[in-house]
């Protein structure tokens, strides 16, 4: 299904009070086995991070604008410029970014290799207001160095 159709479907659904088996949607999303982060376009701040995202980041990124205590690195070790990160590309340029390889260096210096995907979040009239990013772990950097 085309991304624009998915965005329209998401924007038309009111999820207030939505439950599955008595669990509110917020609880389900918070406990997903993949990381999920929502970035607000106007401020560039992280306005939501679920439990798995906090695990992958090594700390809660909620409220951060920019990298904060985290380093985002390319697989060759170079620092990712902010404008090349999937959240920036989705929220600023309206791009759908699929399977971007990335190393997150956590505040404790532990490195985790992930794949992330980002889609722009749009109002019904098409205005981009943010980005939804989901993150999946590939492996710890220690395992990667051994291979």
Image (spheres, grey):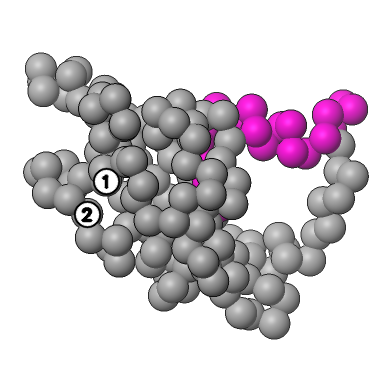
Residue 5, image x and y in percent?
64, 68
> Which residue bears the numbered disc 2?
80
Q: What residue sits 82% from the left and 51% below the top?
A: 15
Say which of 41 and 142 sits in front: 41
> In the rendered structure, which disc, 2 or 1, sits on the residue that comes first in sequence?
1
Q: What residue sits 10% from the left and 43% below the top?
A: 76
Q: Is residue 30 a member of the stretch shown in magenta?
A: yes
Residue 94 left/right relative to 113: right
**Quadrant assignment, res 33:** top right
**Quadrant assignment, res 24:** top right
Image quadrant holding the N terminus, namely bottom right
With respect to residue 64, does 10 lie above or below? below
Q: Secondary structure at mark 2?
A: loop
> Which residue bears the numbered disc 1?
72
Residue 143 left/right relative to 54: left
Decide: marks 2, 1 in contact (CB < 8 A)? yes
Residue 147, image x and y in percent?
11, 20
Q: Which mark is residue 47?
A: none
Residue 7, image x and y in percent?
63, 65
Residue 119, image x and y in percent?
50, 60
Regarding residue 2, the answer to whether it shows in the image is no
Q: What residue sits 47% from the left and 63% below the top?
A: 44
**Quadrant assignment, res 145:** top left
Q: Secondary structure at mark 1?
A: strand
Q: Which residues are magenta?
A: 20-38
């Amino acid at each position: 299904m085309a991304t624009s159709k998915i965005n329209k479907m998401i924007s038309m659904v009111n999820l207030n009070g939505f439950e599955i088996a008595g669990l509110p949607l917020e609880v389900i999303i918070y406990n997903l086995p993949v990381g999920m982060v929502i970035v607000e376009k106007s401020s560039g701040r992280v306005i939501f991070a679920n439990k798995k995202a906090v695990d992958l980041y090594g700390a809660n990124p909620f409220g951060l604008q920019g990298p904060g205590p985290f380093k985002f690195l390319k697989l060759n070790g170079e620092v990712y410029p902010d404008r090349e990160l999937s959240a920036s590309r989705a929220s600023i340029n309206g791009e759908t970014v699929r399977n971007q390889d990335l190393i997150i260096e956590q505040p404790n210096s532990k490195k985790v290799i992930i794949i992330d995907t980002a889609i722009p979040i749009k109002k019904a009239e098409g205005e981009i207001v943010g980005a939804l990013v989901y993150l999946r772990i590939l492996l710890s950097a220690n395992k990667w160095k051994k291979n």
